[in-house]
Image: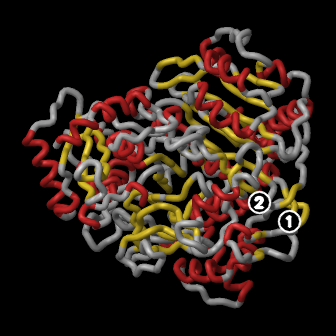
Amino acid sequence: MNAPLTLEQNQPLWQPSPERIAAAHVTAFRQFVNQRRGLQLVDYEALWQWSIHNLGDFWGAVWDSSDVKAEHRGERVYLPADSMPDARFFPDARLNFAQNLLRRKDDLTAILFWGEDKVRRELSWRQLHAEVSRMQQWLAAQGVGPGDRVAAYLPNLPEAIITMLAASSLGAMFTSASPDFGAQGLIDRFGQVQPKVLVACDGYFYAGKTVDVRDKLAEAVPRLESLQAVLIVPYVAQALGARTDLAAIPKARLWAEALAPFAGGEVRFVQLPFDHPLYILYSSGTTGVPKCIVHRAGGVLLKHLSEMRLHADVHTGDRVFYFTTCGWMMWNWLVSALTQSATLCLYDGSPFAAGGNILFDYADAVGMTHFGTSAKFIEAMDKAGLEPIKTHQLSALRSVFSTGSPLVAEGFDTVYQRIKRNVCLSSISGGTDLVSCFTLGTPTHPVWRGEIQAAALGMAVAVFDEDGKPLPDGQKGELVCTQPFPTMPLGFLVDGSMDKGRSKYMDAYFTRMPGVWHHGDYIERTAHHGYIIYGRSDATLNPGGVRIGTAEIYRQVEQLPEVVESLVIGQNWPPGTYNDVRVVLFVKLREGLELDEALINRIKLAIRNNTTPRHVPARVVQVHDIPRTKSNKIVELAVRNLVHGEPVKNLTALANPDALDEYRQLKNELEAS
């Protein structure tokens, strides 16, 4: 058994047992490196240091220890360059991404799916192969080949996985958005990448409601002039036993009807260069039209192999879940669990459907080993009073992942007190920009309250000050990566051209601090060689010239039972000047509560007592809702823009754009006092 939970200040919340350490993939990998290189790397920190100073040896070892399927590996592993984004990995390799995910072809379970409490599905590896084969043949019949784009506007269904695997097997690029995007949001994304094929749904279920998206498709499809074919998955119609009318959607055919002529057979895997484009992902788009970020097949494969094996410790037969939509990079991350011959546990709908416990019901029903969610879900679960530790078995569960926003120390307490004590809690952080992680967990490390366990292997993560100088442990600064890594994007696609996107790509990551990747997170490395993230550095507050991470304030405010959620910005003060910044805190309270002087004082006192006087907001304002993106990230910059009279350029990126109206109306009041 692992050591029991302790909340003592100087003790970890969880310690891996000797048996777990011995069985971990990362332990075997360290031994593999030691034997191959004649080294004596004694622990994770030594392995990490070796990995960032020997990039070619490290990524070569990841390839060789992970049974990568490839036509050719080549001797050359890493070619440095004068410009960090021009560095190359495995320049002579030829492989296929989908081939490395479709490793099995038997009757064991490859995919499980729950659509709230309405739909249950299961696909074996044999069935998955057959469906990918049929989809591949249909795509080829539409003329889809290397370099073409295939788009998906789908819930988190098995059909999204099938489409991605079929597209990538042919060398086509795959891109996706969730069906809660409106027609303009769809056009803003897919209109830039000019897909040849669109696979969409008729609707979806959320919180017990049925949402029809056919009108949005009828509006968007005619404006996506590159489309040659549209395939509709009748998700809602099948669940409700109804027929789907597609008359208003140009070029649309039903999935089953279109694929009927094609029998499931062998999947053909086109062998392509390591840097062949695989995915197109999108920035959040709250400051303009979303950026189209192109990711390379080999880079995603190698980085995800390292994260699934060495960090998430996914083994053959494990059952891996992440609560995500097809519009968030965590979907792309989750899919790569197939490389480990694990079962994907897909879910679509509200995480609080069917009485609030549906995700934990799902975990028990299928024996989830890895449960991934967001920091916001953990916080909401706590406020809702859910205690699956008392109501569910969760006997197979070994790891809990959290991302999307910083998981504060109290969120760690929630996991160990309300979900499960004997579990490795891995707070992870990376981004759409790299479709992977800079910092994440490791099953051989203790879990310290409020800390991400480690920097990812092969990632030269460092903390720099604003002048680009390294900071010692215990000081807050900018997250940078000082060495190249395989999931640096190929670039940004602008007007169908990577060359046109080069300057935007460089400006996004390499101009602020030349020679290193500047990620834009405000971070600290701890004495345990872990990390604490304090929010986005572009949202960092600067009252009196002192930098404050927004997460430091959220941590205090959202412990109060009256507060459901909060958002904090820095307002230029006095208005119209840049003399100073004052802290303004917006709070959403429990239904029926009103913000009064007593509660304001309690909020300010909680912040003052647990941080510093500079953290205390000058104004606390009650609002009805907190605006957020469709991937559930609060949009501090959008609110700050409104308060300063500046536009928010792309409302389609938001899950609740109407929430901004209230902040727009508060501008004059905040300028007056």
Position of residue 518 in the picture relative to residue 616 (left or right): right
Q: Residue at x 44, y 38 (%)?
A: 647
Q: Residue at x 73, y 29 (%)?
A: 199
Q: In the image, residue 241 lies at what x, y percent?
A: 64, 11
Position of residue 379 in the picture relative to residue 510 (left or right): left
Q: Residue at x 18, y 40 (%)?
A: 672
Quarter holding residue 540: bottom left
Q: In the image, residue 6 lies at what x, y percent?
A: 29, 65
Position of residue 428 in the picture relative to residue 338 (left or right): left
Quarter holding residue 556: bottom left
Q: Are marks 2 and 1 in contact (CB under 8 Å)?
A: yes
Q: Which numbered dot is residue 17? A: none
For label 2, the residue is 298
Q: Residue at x 41, y 49 (%)?
A: 375
Q: Is residue 411 above or below residue 516?
A: above
For label 1, the residue is 93
Q: In the image, residue 109 lies at what x, y percent?
A: 69, 41
Position of residue 396 in the picture relative to residue 229 (left or right): left
